[in-house]
Amino acid sequence: MDSGGGFLDETSTHTDTNAALSAQQEHIEQRHIDKIDEAYVNITRKFRKRLPPVVVDVVAEKVGGYESLPELWQDFAPVILATIHLKSPIQRLLNYTGDFHEFCDAFKEDTDLHEYKEYFDAMDFAWTRVLKDKSPTKTDKVRIVNVLRDGQDRASQLGLQEVYPHATDMADDDFDE
């Protein structure tokens, strides 16, 4: 029913407004995803350009790749931080975690244990946040546990005894019942 003022369409519902807000939120989320993806592509490109330590000693000219894990971490940490705030971060974080394990292996000659510990702790925090805030499915939890256990195996080869303690406990809770 029209009030006669002609200013408001009293027949429309709030559904139109909610749909517009939802579309706007999805657009913003997609922009965040695009920025994360772009940053991650740059990281992987630069990672692939790295030279093995023996070659770096011989070659005076740099090719633009990462020279150390701490250097890579400077770019990687913001990607992880942005990812955990997405609506659906699990698949991305699974991929990034698997790649993180590869990064650790690639720089094992020149990375100290305390650096590894710091980075694995940060990844543990990221997974803890996602597990706490995003309600992953049982299938997601199985995949998460698998990637975390893979990380534990790789970390033990690097000399670390315990990594991902909090995230593993949280993700593994359902399977211990």
Image (cartoon, rainbow, N blue to C red):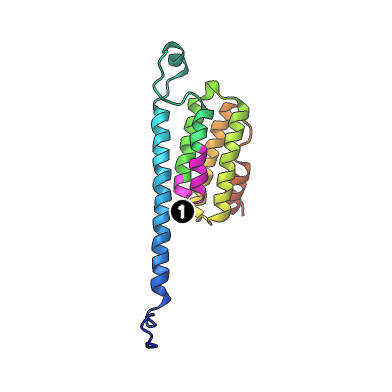
User: Label 1 is placed on what type of residue?
Assistant: Ser
Direction top: furthest residue: 58
11 vs 172, left or right, is left
Which of these two is toward me, 77 or 55? 77
Q: Position of residue 147 (x, y in %)?
A: 50, 41
What type of secondary structure mainly makes up the magenta span? helix
Q: At 47% across and 17% down in the image, what residue appears?
A: 53
Residue at position x 42%, y 39% from top?
Answer: 39
Question: With respect to residue 5, does 125 lie above or below?
Answer: above
Q: Nearer the viewer, residue 103 or 40?
A: 40
Q: Is residue 159 magenta?
A: no
Query: Is 8 on the left-hand or right-hand side of 73?
Result: left
For image coordinates 53% across by 24% down, the residue present is 108
Within-10-Å neighbours for mark 1: few <14, some 14–19, many 20+:
some
Q: Give residue 115's quadrant in the image.
A: top right
Instruction: Tell me if residue 83 is in the magenta stretch.
Output: yes
Q: Residue at x 42, y 13 (%)?
A: 60
**Which image quarter holds the C terminus?**
bottom right
Tell me the magenta residue range: 77-92
> Residue 19: image x %, image y %?
39, 68
Depicted 41 relative to depicted 60: above or below: below
**Rendered view: 142 above or below 155:** below
x, y percentage for residue 63?
39, 21
Residue 164 locus on image (x, y percent) = 59, 40
The quadrant of the image that shows the N terminus is bottom left
Secondary structure of the residue carrying tag 1 is: loop
* Disc 1 target residue: 88
